[in-house]
Image (cartoon, rainbow, N blue to C red):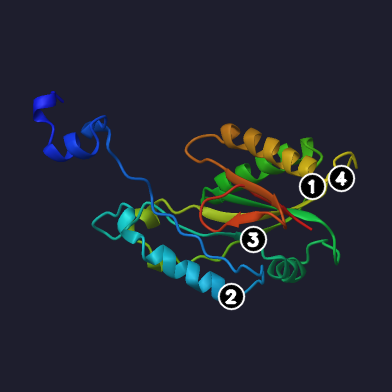
Amino acid sequence: MPDGDRSLWVHRRAPDLDPWREHDACGVGFVARASGEQSHDILTRALQAVARVAHRGAASTDNSGDGAGLLTQIPRRLLAEEAARLGLPLGAGQRFALGVFFLPPEPAALERATALIEAVLREEGLPVLGWRDVPTDATLLGASARATCPAIRQAFVAAPVDGGRADEDAWERALYLARRTIEPSSPRPWTAAARMRTPGSAHSTSRGAPSSAA
């Protein structure tokens, strides 16, 4: 843009700013207790914060959005209860990792995706204890979002079998490397977005990959 076309505001306030490159970032909020106490009230307030930055996201005419969510600690008690309900071989106090995957909903493609993920984890010495289908409510989605909605699955991953990665940092690295192998290996038209973390780590409730818990 020629200097003569720049606004007076640009000249006075930001003489080095190119108006063609001006843009805003997505809205972000942070809610926590200084005491570190866990509380459902924190989650409630975080959901209110997400709702109040809705104007920062994109939305289509059918009310489909570009995605938003929360990043929280991994809920150990909930996952332990779910593992018991599903009959997974997870003992009391056993360390495990959690993988969150966004996969194709078609049965055949879902089966192939699941097999690929388990094979990569197995190669890294990370046994999969079992899977949990994350409950969703597609009735809240617009038509275009509902048409592309993935199946969201969580993998319970046991600690490394070789015993050589007992410390959490090494375990996290193994999970990260598995994730980086899984994502580019996902055949089109689906991708396995993974978040792998141990229970002391943060956990995303929107977009995902594996994580671990103790």
**Which amino acid type is shown beneath numbered disc 3?**
Gln
Q: Say which element carries label 2.
A: helix
Number of marks present in the image shown: 4
Look at 39% across and 57% down and name the residue there: 146
User: Which residue is the site of mark 1?
Assistant: 168
Q: CA distance from mark 4 to mark 2?
A: 32 Å
- Mark positioned earlier in the residue sequence (2 or 3): 2
User: Which residue is the site of mark 4?
Assistant: 166
Side (left or right) of 134 relative to 28: right
The C terminus: image quadrant: bottom right
**Which amino acid type is shown beneath numbered disc 2?**
His
Q: CA distance from mark 1 to mark 2?
A: 27 Å
Look at 62% across and 42% down and name the residue there: 112
Which of the two residues, 187 or 11, is positioned nearer the viewer here? Answer: 11
Q: Say which element carries label 3.
A: strand
- Mark positioned earlier in the residue sequence (4 or 3): 3
- Mark positioned earlier in the residue sequence (1 or 2): 2
User: Which residue is the site of mark 3?
Assistant: 73
